[in-house]
Image: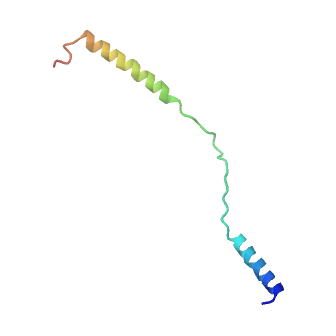
Amino acid sequence: MTTPQKTIFLAGCIALTAACTPTIRIEPSDKPITINLNVKIDQEVRIKLDKEVEDLISSNPDLFPQ
């Protein structure tokens, strides 16, 4: 091959290689982002219930005999 033919061949190879590259698109969601904050509330409820159960057991030791 001569130099102009090599140049055209090389340009064609580069164009074909560039056409085969994958495209990644990041699109935002149409729905709003929601953050569930019920975990903290759930933990507070459990702590309060645990404290009430401890108080109940300590005030009534005959509930769970050993």
Numbered marks: total: 0
The single residue placed furthest to the left in the displayed view is 66
Q: Position of residue 47 (x, y in %)?
A: 40, 21
Q: Position of residue 37 (x, y in %)?
A: 53, 30
**Which residue is pictured at 82% across the width and 85% down the height?**
3
> Would residue 63 be found to the left or right of residue 36 on screen?
left
41 shown above or below 4: above
The single residue placed furthest to the right in the displayed view is 4
The single residue placed furthest to the bottom in the displayed view is 1
**Which residue is pictured at 48% across the width and 24% down the height?**
41
Look at the image and tell me in which quarter the N terminus lies: bottom right
Identify the image quadrant of residue 10: bottom right
Identify the image quadrant of residue 61: top left
Q: Position of residue 59 (x, y in %)?
A: 26, 9
Look at the image and tell me in which quarter the C terminus lies: top left
> Would residue 25 be found to the left or right of residue 52 on screen?
right
> Would residue 21 be found to the left or right of residue 8 on screen?
left
**Which residue is pictured at 31% across the width and 16% down the height?**
54
Q: Position of residue 18 (x, y in %)?
A: 72, 70
31 shown above or below 35: below
Nearest to the observer: residue 21 or residue 42: 21
**Which residue is pictured at 37% across the width and 19% down the height?**
49
Nearest to the observer: residue 56 or residue 21: 21
62 shown above or below 35: above
